[in-house]
Amino acid sequence: MADKEKREIAKPVADFLREGKRIPTTEFSFKGTRFDVLGYNEDEKCFYVVECKLSKSIAGIGKTLGQILGYHSAIAHYSHAFLDKVNSSKEREWFQFRDNERIILQNEFPVKFFVALKKENAQKNIHHLEWIDKNILDDHLGIILVDKNKKCEIIKQPKPYKIPIERHYRKREEFLKDIKEKTLVNSTEVEFNSIRNVIRYYFGNHGSFTFKVWLKRNGPIEIGFYMERDKKNNHKLFQMLLKYEKKISAILPYAQFEKKYGRRRSWRKIYENIEWDGKINSLNGELLDKVSNLLCEYVKTLKPILDEVEWGKIER
């Protein structure tokens, strides 16, 4: 962005957004693009991306179309990276972590795109922008005008684009940590074991009876309830749960009841698998949803039964 463009349009627009609780930053670089102004509206929970134009010509103003489409593409294709960049930038105070957590849980976030023009330059050619917006961008382009006194006015509000969040993970432990954030299981303790690629959820003092997500090295992903105490107590609780097999299977139709696995073949488990090829680049947001939702179903289904049978009244 040229100094004149920044001085005459970008700075007044940033000041205008700041006054309206749409806290801004200028020249935000992301994935080979640079947003002239990026704002975040705390009331709308919505990002504002503003392209600033000094040009008076039809061609110059028309370039806005390509730039807006480029910005939209960059954010849409790298949505999680965009949130990470915003959240780690020096302007982090304007994007509160509670909003970041809320956005992750909702799997999408809104973005509004604007073009900002000097009012005197826009008079003759603004109808071209309106035509582009109506016929190509489907009413997703907003217009901000800046007058000679650097006062700004939004003369057209755009419809927001809903950007779905798609994340691809670089490490198994990152995937497991996001399961914890997304699952919201109200357990007494959560344990990560990055060496074994496992996350365990504990309840009360039943330390050897846990819910678990296990990323097997070559796949699949195993989710379930695990009885890994001594043989006597494992068998006792397992037999109690077998009495509820019909009820459990009605909610968890793919649940498998397995005995005699692990050390000395004395452990028990109720579990199922989600297909995964074991490759890191296959860990993504869609798989995260499947795993976290299934884990929630296991806890929601089995914990009331475990409480009812008093977790087998474990002998100390």
Image (spheres, grey):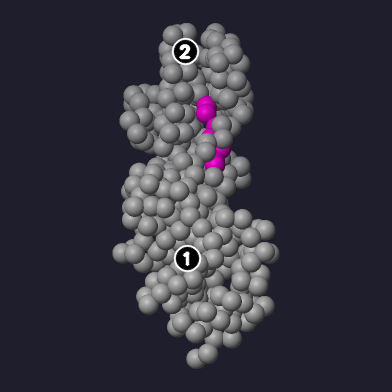
Quarter the N terminus occupies: top left
Closer to the chain start, of discs 2 and 1, is 2
Q: Residues within 10 Å of mark 1 (few under 14, many from 20)?
A: many
The residue identified by callout 1 is: 212
Q: Which residues are magenta?
A: 108-114
Q: Tell me residue 186's x, y (percent).
A: 57, 68
Numbered tag placed on residue 303 in the rendering:
none
Q: Is residue 274 magenta?
A: no
Q: Residue at x 42, y 70 (%)?
A: 261
SS at mark 2 in the image:
helix
Q: Label 2 amino acid?
A: Gly
The mark total stands at: 2
Q: Residue at x 66, y 70 (%)?
A: 244
Is 193 or 155 nearer to us in this picture?
193
Is 105 or 151 nearer to us in this picture?
105
Q: Tell me residue 254's x, y (percent).
A: 57, 55
State whether residue 168 is above or below residue 260.
above
Q: Tell me residue 158's x, y (percent).
A: 60, 27
State whether residue 109 is above or below residue 97.
above
Is 153 or 263 nearer to us in this picture?
263
Q: Is residue 294 visible?
A: yes
The residue identified by callout 2 is: 62
Q: Label 1 amino acid?
A: Lys
Q: Residue at x 61, y 58 (%)?
A: 252
Q: Residue at x 50, y 23 (%)?
A: 115
